[in-house]
């Protein structure tokens, strides 16, 4: 596998499966560029470019582009990855809901990001949009291609602010509105269920939207919905950053941020399907684990003192609420 921190945007691995696949790839690369431009302008720092291509003979074929900032003025650590890979057989994490596709060759591409701000008054955020196509051999010797989309975004505050949660959820709702009134309540509930730490009995944050295995609108409209979600990320998150980035904070608040970041690590390593898919399919470990925060702390059986802002995060924010309707 070759890498270069200054490599240009990757060229498409050949051959592309279809014009539809090419269109998805072109959109994802453009989305990554637009997100990085907006975040870099906000931070004032530079995102490292790490382009990579899978060498012949490796388990996966394909290419990608990782973009990373560390020790920025606003973003302590953040990554935004594009990848486009092909493999001989879908890993178990991708077929648990589609057992008939076990062992099918596949093609996967997506943009995934996690941003960990320095100031604990600014929430951590995650966003992912992706396409997965499985090429299933049929008994008559032909091949059926099954394509579906997934993704979403969610917000993880350390110090909850109702205004921020309402804004984030309303942008998510509005991104889905053109594709059916039932999608937002469904994807919001799916997000609340998915980003839940079962061993802790608590949500990771205030949620957002999440969907997977989605193609019920047909390829064109499902892809349009994916674009709407991807395009909504900057208007959902950047205004929150701009409102909170200059607020003062204490070392005690930084300590609580590091403690809560531990929940992020636990979820990503135990439950996250994207992390499991990447590791099981032989993906790039550095890119997969780019979502990890730079400073994390664990404490034994710690609980916040009653009446504090830290306690209010648990009582008022780490529970499902209809934020888009004002909470």
Image: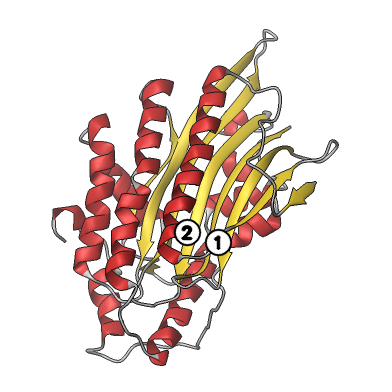
Q: Is residue 163 visible?
A: yes
Whether pointer 2 and pointer 1 mark residues with C-beta atoms closer than 8 Å, the reply is yes
Seen as rendered, the residue at the extreme right is: 57
The quadrant the C terminus occupies is bottom left
* Cα–Cα gap, marks 2 and 1: 6 Å
Which numbered circle lies on residue 46?
A: 1
Between discs 2 and 1, the one toward the N terminus: 2
Q: Position of residue 79 (x, y in %)?
A: 55, 58
User: In the rendered view, would you say 143 is above or below 70?
Assistant: above
For image coordinates 79% across by 47% down, the residue present is 2
Q: Residues within 10 Å of mark 2 (few under 14, many from 20)?
A: some
Residue 40 numbered tag: 2
Residue sitting at 43 percent across and 77 percent down? 260
State left or right for residue 103 relative to residue 134: right
Residue plotted at (30% across, 51% down): 235
Q: Is residue 176 above or below residue 259?
A: above
The outermost residue toward the left is: 326
């Amino acid at each position: 596998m070759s890498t270069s921190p200054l490599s240009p945007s990757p060229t498409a691995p050949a051959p592309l499966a279809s014009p539809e696949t090419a269109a998805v790839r072109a959109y994802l690369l453009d989305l990554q560029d637009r997100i990085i431009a907006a975040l870099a302008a906000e931070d004032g720092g530079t995102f490292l470019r790490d382009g990579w291509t899978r060498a012949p003979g490796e388990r996966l074929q394909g290419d990608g582009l990782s973009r990373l900032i560390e020790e920025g003025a606003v973003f302590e650590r953040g990554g935004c990855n594009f990848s486009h890979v092909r493999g001989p057989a879908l890993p178990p994490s991708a077929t648990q809901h589609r057992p008939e596709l076990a062992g099918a060759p596949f093609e996967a591409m997506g943009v995934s990001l996690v941003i960990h701000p320095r100031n604990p008054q600014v929430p951590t955020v995650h966003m992912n949009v992706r396409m997965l196509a499985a090429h299933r051999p049929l008994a008559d010797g032909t091949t059926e291609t099954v394509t579906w989309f997934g993704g979403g975004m969610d917000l993880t505050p350390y110090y909850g602010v109702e205004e921020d949660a309402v804004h984030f959820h309303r942008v998510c709702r509005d991104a889905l509105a053109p594709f059916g009134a039932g999608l937002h309540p469904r994807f919001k509930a799916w997000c609340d269920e998915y980003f839940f730490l079962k061993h802790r009995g608590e949500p990771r944050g205030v949620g957002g939207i999440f969907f997977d295995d989605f193609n019920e609108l047909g390829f064109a409209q499902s892809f349009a919905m994916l674009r709407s979600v991807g395009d909504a990320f900057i208007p959902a998150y950047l205004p929150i950053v701009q409102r909170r980035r200059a607020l003062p904070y204490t070392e005690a608040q930084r300590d609580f941020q590091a403690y809560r970041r531990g929940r992020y690590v636990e979820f990503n390593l135990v439950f996250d399907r994207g992390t499991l898919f990447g590791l099981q399919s032989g993906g790039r470990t550095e890119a997969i684990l780019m979502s990890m925060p730079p400073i994390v702390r664990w404490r034994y059986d710690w609980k916040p003192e009653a009446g504090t802002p830290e306690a209010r995060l648990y009582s008022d924010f780490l529970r499902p609420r209809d934020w888009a309707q004002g909470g």
